[in-house]
Image (tube, rainbow, N blue to C red):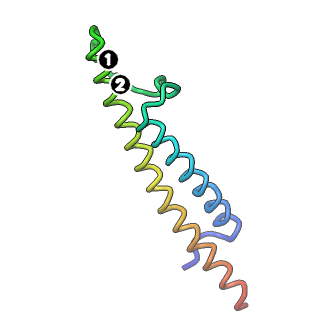
């Protein structure tokens, strides 16, 4: 079933491929506790008065952000598959006409 045109499907393929690569790499860097990403960690409303509390909250934040990136990458995989299917359907129907 054709839902979108060939240009839209190709655009979806390109954006999804880039999203997968970027989010997988960001997830890896979050999982590796990259210091450059500390500004993206949410500490919430906690009082971080000791170093142990800060390190625990930072570790939890890095792990949560890594999982969030990987979940978003999986959603982009679904978008990639849908766009690929639409691209295939559009190229197939244009050949048979």
Q: Is residue 92 left or right of residue 64?
A: right
Quadrant of the frame with the N terminus: bottom right
The x, y position of residue 83, in whole percent, is 58, 67
Label count reads 2
Distance Cα–Cα, label 1 vs label 2 = 6 Å
Q: Residue at x 41, y 38 (%)?
A: 31
Secondary element at image label 2 = helix
Tell me the residue that label 1 is attached to: 54
> Which one is nearer the viewer's eye here, 31 or 46?
31
* Residue plotted at (44% across, 44% down): 69
In this picture, residue 79 sits left or right of residue 13: left
Report the residue marked by disc 2.
58
**Furthest-top residue in view?**
49
Q: Residue at x 50, y 48 (%)?
A: 24
Image position of 19 with respect to 57: above or below = below
On residue 2, the disc is: none
């Amino acid at each position: 079933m054709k839902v979108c045109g060939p240009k839209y499907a190709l655009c979806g393929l390109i954006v999804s491929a880039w999203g997968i690569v970027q989010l997988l790499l960001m997830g890896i860097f979050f999982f590796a506790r990259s210091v450059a990403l500390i500004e993206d960690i949410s500490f919430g409303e906690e009082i971080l008065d000791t170093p142990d509390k800060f390190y625990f909250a930072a570790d939890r934040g890095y792990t949560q952000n890594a999982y969030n990136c990987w979940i978003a990458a999986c959603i982009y995989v679904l978008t990639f598959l849908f766009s690929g299917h639409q691209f295939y359907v559009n190229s197939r129907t244009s050949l048979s006409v």
